Image (cartoon, grey):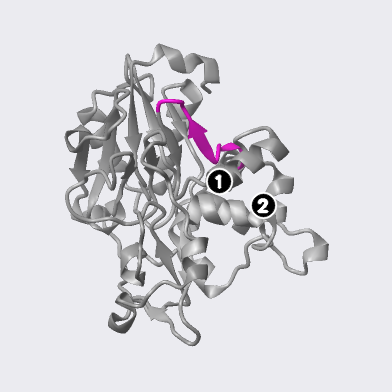
Amino acid sequence: MLAEHELDRFKGFDIIGDIHGCAETLKRLLAKLGYSLKSGVWRHQTRLAVFLGDIVDRGPHIREALAIVHSMVESGSAVCIMGNHEYNAVGYCTPAPAIMGQEYLREHNNHHNRLIAETLEQFAAYPEEWKNYIEWFRSLPLFYDFGSFRVVHACWDDFLISEYLKRYHSNRVSLEFIIKSVDRESFEGKLMDRLTRGTDLKLPAGRVITSRDGYQRRFFRTKFWAEDPETYGDVVFQPDPLPEDLVDRKLSDDERENLLFYPRSAAPLFIGHYWLQGKPRPITSNIACMDYSAVKYGRLAAYRFDGESKLQADKFTWIYVNPPEWREPEPD
């Protein structure tokens, strides 16, 4: 595993978005980026791969995708942060303390069962291997600040991250922290929700958004980079559209106050999580989302970062996912 002080030996970084079990596409992308397979590990002589989490769930080759990423991290040719799906897996497979009144940290209800179904099925014959991966997930950093750029799975919140570092003195979590994070109103719960799922606003009373599979939401995901937004439509950032009558609804003062803003003067930031489509490009001059719906027959994307302060469209590269690796996703 790579020590922090060893980062200086790399001349560039390749930031790679959500894989979700698309191992065959990942191998093609790594080859396109100039990585080669040596002694069972994908390596580059001068560059470091940076994975943004969500390696597991949904796709057809989850076990192989994990093996590729894990071997790269352990050998020092990559780093990987925790996505909400790794966090979910830890909670799903970790028994809850008796005082919580539930069997596992993440309840085994129908929705949670569906989200992790492919992963558990593909590891059914390898229980010890899966147990080891759960331990590895618990050790993953929540974020990295490389100085010249930052990575987090869904949202960078300076206040929460600074407070977290004051309290825990690390970018990694402990089992005690994960147990506390089950309470969504706790500091730990708010931090995990913000960093791995992003920001949101509550819909007006009684209103819901129904996704394509019938799952109902009472919140909608929001941009954390919108300058001077006035309406719901100015801040919505999710695959499912808002009801038409809410697009032009004015943001209240309280709603505007609760929105987060990542300033243009801050270091370039790379996120995953959001199921974008189309040709990869920066969201703003200093924010790029690398999740281009790989497991939804989209693209597995990477950004080749070489120290620039303003992100450039021509630094993106990608591989289209072949139809056999496609699956219609469940909502997070």
Q: Residue at x 40, y 37 (%)?
A: 51
Q: Amino acid at mark 1?
A: Trp
The residue lying toward the viewer, choosing from 304 and 244, is 244
Q: In which quadrant is the C terminus drawn?
A: bottom left
Instruction: Examine the rendering and report whether any part of residue 199 can be seen.
Output: yes
Q: Residue at x 34, y 38 (%)?
A: 16
- Determine the secondary structure under disc 2: helix
Residue 139 painted magenta: yes
Q: From the top left corner, tell me how far across and down residue 291 is, in percent.
A: 32, 49
Compared with residue 321, is residue 264 higher up or lower down, i.e. above or below? above
Compared with residue 81, is residue 176 higher up or lower down, i.e. above or below? below
Q: From the top left corner, tell me how far across and down residue 208 is, in percent.
A: 43, 82
Q: From the top left corner, tell me how far across and down residue 293 is, in percent.
A: 29, 54
Q: Amino acid at mark 2?
A: Glu
Residue reaching furthest to the right = 99
Cα–Cα gap, marks 1 and 2: 25 Å
Residue 39 painted magenta: no
**Mark 2 Cα within 10 Å, few/some/many (few <14, many 20+)?**
many
Q: Residue at x 65, y 42 (%)?
A: 164
Compared with residue 233, is residue 205 higher up or lower down, i.e. above or below? below
The residue lying toward the viewer, choosing from 205 and 294, is 205
Q: Which residue is mark 2?
A: 188
Magenta range is 138-148
The residue lying toward the viewer, choosing from 328 and 274, is 274
Mark with earlier residue (1, 2): 1
Residue 279 lies left or right of residue 176; in this view the side is: left
Q: How many marks?
A: 2
Instruction: Examine the rendering and report whether any part of residue 89 can be seen.
Output: no
- Determine the secondary structure under disc 1: helix
Q: Which residue is mark 1?
A: 130
Residue 318 lies left or right of residue 246; in this view the side is: left
